[in-house]
Amino acid sequence: MLQAEAPLAPMQPPATLEHDRARLREFIEAHPRLFVLTGAGCSTDSGIPDYRDTRGDWKRPQPVTYQAFMGETATRQRYWARSLVGWRRFGRARPNATHHALARLEQQGRVTTLLTQNVDGLHQAAGQQRVIDLHGRLDEVRCMSCEQRLPRDAFQHALVTGNPAWAELDAGDAPDGDADLEGRDFSSFDVPACPACGGILKPDVVFFGENVPRSRVDAAITSLNAADAMLVVGSSLMVFSGYRFAAAAARDGKPIAAVNMGRTRADPLLALKIEQSCAQALSFVI
C-alpha cells in the first residue's frame, strides 16, 4: 500500500515569518556560546534529498543496515551500484545559504562547535572550522579489514572501470548519494575489493545498526558542556545518535531552539521552535 504524502505545512503570513526570525535572532544573541546540531534539512537546498517527512516518518524504505552490508554480497552489490549512479551528482553538491549562515555565526564567535549528522562535508566546504562529523563522511572509503582509506572519487573510478554499462544509467536522487534504481538485477555488478588486502570496502560513514565512534560522542559532549545553549538546524532528531545531545542539554538546563519543518523527537524539550526552511530562518545572518 502506498503511504499517503504528508500534508503541506500551512502558509504563514509574512508578519509571522518575520516574528519567528526575530525570536530566533534574539535566542542566538542571548546565548553567545552555541552548540549547533545539524541534519539533512541543511542540505536539501544543495540538491541532496532528506529522509523524513513533516511527521518525522520515513519517506522511503529505511537505509541499508551495517549487518546486511557486511554479511551479504547481494546487499553490497545493490549499495555500490546505486552509489555509482548517485555519486555523480552528490559529489558535485555545493554549500547553500544555510551552510554559509552557520559558518558566519562561527566567524562571529557565536558557535563553539557544530555537530552534524550529515555525511556530505558541506559545512567544511562553506568554511566551518569546528565541525564534528557524527556519522562520518561519504567522500572516503574504508577497508573493514586493514583500515586503509581511499578517496571516494578514486573508488568511483574503480566502480566505473569494472561496471561500464552501469555508468551509462541515470536515476532519481535519493539521500546521501543513493539513487533510485528499483527493479534492477544487481547480481552481475562487480564490487572492487580493497587493493591492499582484498577486504570489504565500505563508505566511511555510520550505517544503521552500527555504533557511532565513542571518541566523537565524547568530543561532542565536551563541546556541549562548554556551551550555554543548543541550536538544532534541519534535524527531526528521530535517530537516538542525535537526540541524545538534546536530552543531555535539557538535563543540564540549557535552552534548546530548533529550526525544522515538522515534528522533532525533542519537541517537548524545546524553548523555541521555528517551522521554516533553514535558509529562510537564518536569512538575518549577514
Image (tube, rainbow, N blue to C red):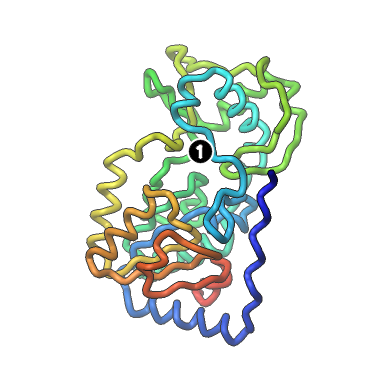
| Total residue callouts | 1
Q: Quadrant of residue 55?
A: bottom right
Disc 1 element: strand
215 relative position to 103: left or right: left
Position of residue 70 measured from the top left corner of the image (x, y, whole percent): 46, 22
Q: Quadrant of residue 178?
A: top right
Quadrant of the drawing holding the N terminus: top right
Nearer to me, 88 or 267: 267
* Residue at figure coordinates x 28%, y 65% from the top left: 250
Position of residue 256 measured from the top left corner of the image (x, y, whole percent): 35, 69
Does 281 sit above or below residue 205? below
* Residue at figure coordinates x 54%, y 17% from the top left: 73
158 relative position to 166: left or right: left
Position of residue 53 measured from the top left corner of the image (x, y, whole percent): 58, 56
Nearer to me, 54 or 3: 3
Q: Pointer 1: residues within 10 angstroms few (<14), some, or many (20+)?
A: many
254 relative position to 185: left or right: left
Q: What is the residue that sits farthest to the top in this orientation?
A: 198
Tell me the amino acid under the disc marked 1. Answer: Leu
Q: Which residue is mark 1?
A: 138
Position of residue 247 measured from the top left corner of the image (x, y, whole percent): 31, 59
225 relative position to 55: left or right: left
* Residue at figure coordinates x 38%, y 23% from the top left: 147
Q: What is the residue that sits farthest to the front in this orientation?
A: 1
* Residue at figure coordinates x 62%, y 79% from the top left: 12
